[in-house]
Amino acid sequence: MRNIDDYSIEQQVKDIKQSFRQLMDGQVAQSMRQKGMDYHLNWGATLPRLREMAEELKARHLAIEGATADRATTYPLAIALWKENIRECKILATMLMPPDELLPEVADIWMEQTATVEIAEQLAFNLMQHVPYAAEKAFLWLSSPDDLPQICGYHILSRLFMRKLEPNERAINEFIDQALAALQSPTPPLRKAAMQSVIHFADIALIYQRIASAAIRSIGLDFL
């Protein structure tokens, strides 16, 4: 069994990057480019395959360390992968980062370094919805002047609302105010993320449905 000291994070990242050649899907990569998803390097690997790869990496990490699940951590590998300007590396980083080990300031750095809608979505779905401070960070990002933090924030809240997390009155007012502004944004992905979060908010209970419906109608939109 190879010791973790003999298998550096740098070497692990190198091996992972080489393995992407086996996952290459030129049609997917070309489709992303046509949709404006411009990455420094994009192998076009599908998300299901990347999830399988993340699970394989977690298992391999345990085997290399010879550690039990409560001792081994993929934190250093996730940090190293995020630094690579490669689509698949960044997505894997969001899948490998242990949510309870991600410091809020590191989350902010990752958000600042997020350059595409896809990575903002993956950051929310794979990681940020699971961190202990998910709601706090989501509301902070909703107030950002930039679209990508807002998109990430709305996706985080969507997942929390799906788990029937009930916001307090102050949070409800802030959410509705921010969502109404986002729904009138010229950016389609932001409008979509905001509407999805409003729909999931409304699904919590009848009172939330009434709040959402009245708010949506106030800006001339129909609420499904």
Image: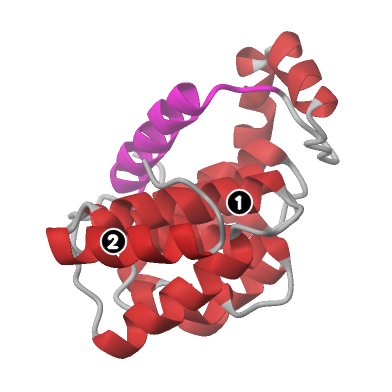
Q: Nearer the viewer, residue 167 or 163?
A: 167
Give the quarter of the image for residue 9: bottom right
Give the quarter of the image for residue 151: bottom right
Say which residue appears at 68% left-offset and 45% top-offset.
Answer: 188
Q: Where in the figure is residue 95, as x and y percent of width and height?
A: 44, 47
Residue 158 falls inside the magenta stretch: no
Q: Which numbered disc, 1 or 2, marks the residue closer to the eye?
A: 1
C-beta proximity under 8 Å, tags 1 and 2? no
Quarter holding the C terminus is top left
Mark 2 is on which residue type?
A: Leu
Decide if residue 5 is in sight here. Answer: no
Bin the neighbour count of mark 1 within 10 Å (Cα to Cα): few under 14, some 14-19, many 20 and up: many
Q: Secondary structure at mark 1?
A: helix
Mark 1 is on which residue type?
A: Arg
Quarter holding the N terminus is top left
Mark 1 vs mark 2, CA separation in Å = 19 Å
Q: Main secondary structure of the magenta part?
A: helix
Would you name the residue on which mark 1 appears?
191
Q: Where in the figure is residue 135, as x and y percent of width and height?
A: 36, 75
Q: Secondary structure at mark 2?
A: helix
Say which residue appears at 25% left-offset and 62% top-offset.
Answer: 210
Decide if residue 24 is in sight here. Answer: yes
Q: Is residue 170 above or below residue 156?
A: below
Residue 208 in the figure: left or right of residue 139:
left
What span is colored magenta in the figure? Answer: 44-65
Say which residue appears at 41% left-offset and 60% top-offset.
Answer: 156
Bin the neighbour count of mark 2 within 10 Å (Cα to Cα): few under 14, some 14-19, many 20 and up: many
Would you name the residue on which mark 2 appears?
160
